[in-house]
Every structure is written in structure tokens, then in C-alpha cells.
Image (spheres, rainbow, N blue to C red):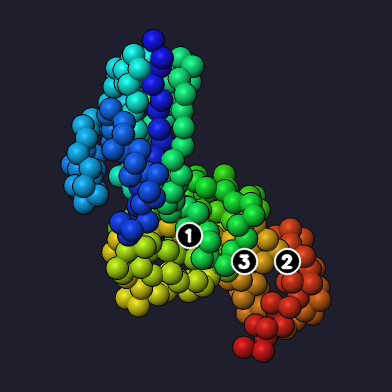
Amino acid sequence: MKQGCLYIVATPIGNLSDISQRAVETLKMVDLIAAEDTRHSQKLLTALGIQNRLVSLHDHNERTRSDSLVGRLINGENIALISDAGTPMISDPGYHLIRLAQDEGIRISPVPGPSAVVSALSVSGLPANRFYFHGFLPDRTAARKAALELLTGIQETLVFYESGKRISSCLSDIRDVFSGVREAVICRELTKLHETIQRGTVDTLLAGFKAGELDERGEFVLLIEGTTRKQDVDLQLIQRLLEELKGSVPAGKLASAVSRALRCPRKLVYELIMNMKDD
């Protein structure tokens, strides 16, 4: 008996028009659709005029459900895997199913389409030739800062998913661990009615949320500049040193000391000191 195929189907992250023709045809053709949330996915199928059977595959049942799904694939059924939005497996369930299917030699075929990560990178203005996708950071501050500490040396653009409830506290922790001068971009409600894309530094974006100028509601993709010369400079530390020393130490010597302490180029520190003096 010929085995079936497992299709990994990308679905819209907001705008329904982003669904591909191939995705629609695949969802109509398969014998079964495995969905992260069947109630959510049923609304999508109804809007697309697709009548097909749905079965849930989420974080809490993936290990047990994968066995039965692979059994169906072995018996010749075709199955589509979809998530609530975007491309499956990107911070979504599906890993155990795909690995088990691979172990059984089952064909796995991607049906590409929308992805919040790629969409955000494409409009960010940050380097996208190389990037580091982390997904969701931990909820609690201590754990989140610990996770961020492990990322301090990464030179590629950092990409996170975040909820509106935590976006401000997340930026605050990023400021504390990375510094507030890193360039950052928030992409809110991508492809939806209230889509917002805002670029600035960690400090300016955080200030915007605190002042109520930026909307905290919705879903966010947060992009942070990778490690650069500028990121390593603690502006608050330099400011304190300038105030305490009150000009008693020449700017050149101060720049040398700070650059050694923070392991960043002396020229950049000197320029920052000159700018602060002018201010």
C-alpha cells in the first residue's frame, strides 16, 4: 500500500487574502487536517468554503496524537498540518509529528506562505541576510533576563514574538540586559486592520508605550539589532562618569577607560562623550 503525504500548510497571519491557491487546493484534497485549535481553524475553512475533517494537534496532546496520525499516513491517507496562523512549526506544535513521520519514511511536503517572522524582517530596515529567531521569551522577569543574557553576543538581528500584555516589560528587560541604544522595531498586528510598524531604539519605543503613544494591544513581532559597537556602550554609565568627574579627567582618557571596561571601540565612546558634553 502506498503511504500518504504529510503537508505542512501555511495559513494567513491576518489578511485572509494572503492564502495561496495551492494551500486552498491542498486543504480541500487531504483526508484530514491537523490543527492547533480546531475552533479557530474551522472559521478559516468556512471562510474559504472548505469542508473537511479537523482534528486537534496542540502542545498538550501532540505526543499521543502523533502516533495515530502517522498510522493514518502509513495506511495511505494524506494529512495537512496547519497552525492558528502562519507557517506551522515556527513557535507552533508539529515537531513530534514531523519527526515521527520522518522516522517512518513518510513523505513530508511544505506548502509555503505567510510567516510573521519573514514579514517583519522584510519591513524592519534591520539586516535580514542573517537573523536569530528566538520566538517567545519567558513570562517572568528573572527568567526572561536570564534568557536574554545568553543572547548578548549574537551579532545577527534578533527576532522575538511577544504579546501586548508583556511588550513593555519585555522591552524594559531588553534595555537592562542589552542597553537602551540598540535599534529596535515593533511590528504589531501584521497584515491586520490595525497594523503598526514602528522603528526606534529600545529606549524610545519603551517611552512610547509608557506615554500611551504606542498601542499595547494585539500581537507583536519584536526585532532587535544584533551586537554592534554602539550596543556595547552604556550611555547611563558614561553620563554618570561625566557628572562625577566634572571635567577633571580629559575626554580622551575617559574614552580609553570606558572603552576598555565595556570592550567597545574608543572612537565611538569618545564621540558619545563629545555629544553628551554638547547636550
Q: Classify 2 as above or below 279.
A: above
Gap in angstroms between the C-alphas marked 3 and 2: 9 Å
**Residue depth check, mark 2 versus mark 1: number of the one nearer the observer:** 1
Front-most of residues 80 and 237: 80
Q: Is residue 178 left or right of residue 48?
A: right
Gap in angstroms between the C-alphas marked 2 and 1: 35 Å
**Mark 2 or mark 1: which comes first in sequence?**
1
Q: Residue at x 72, y 83 (%)?
A: 274
**Mark 1 or mark 3: which comes first in sequence?**
1
Q: Residue at x 67, y 89 (%)?
A: 278
Q: Where in the figure is residue 201, as x and y percent of width and height?
A: 53, 70
Q: Which corner quadrant of the image does residue 237 belong to?
A: bottom right
Q: Is residue 41 left or right of residue 175?
A: left
Front-most of residues 11 and 249: 11
Residue 258's label in the rendered image is 2
* Three-letter residue code for mark 3: Asp
The answer to whether mark 3 and mark 2 are in CB contact below 8 A is no
Residue 120's label in the rendered image is 1
Residue 234's label in the rendered image is 3
Q: Where in the figure is residue 239, as x and y percent of width and height?
A: 62, 76
Q: Classify 10 as above or below 32.
A: below
**Residue depth check, mark 1 versus mark 3: number of the one nearer the observer:** 1
Q: Where in the figure is residue 220, as x and y percent of width and height?
A: 38, 59
Q: Secondary structure at mark 1?
A: helix
**Mark 3 or mark 2: which comes first in sequence?**
3
Front-most of residues 225 and 273: 225
- Rendered-image quadrant of the C terminus: bottom right
Q: Residue at x 79, y 72 (%)?
A: 267
Q: Where in the figure is residue 255, as x and y percent of width and height?
A: 76, 72
The answer to whether mark 2 and mark 1 are in CB contact below 8 A is no
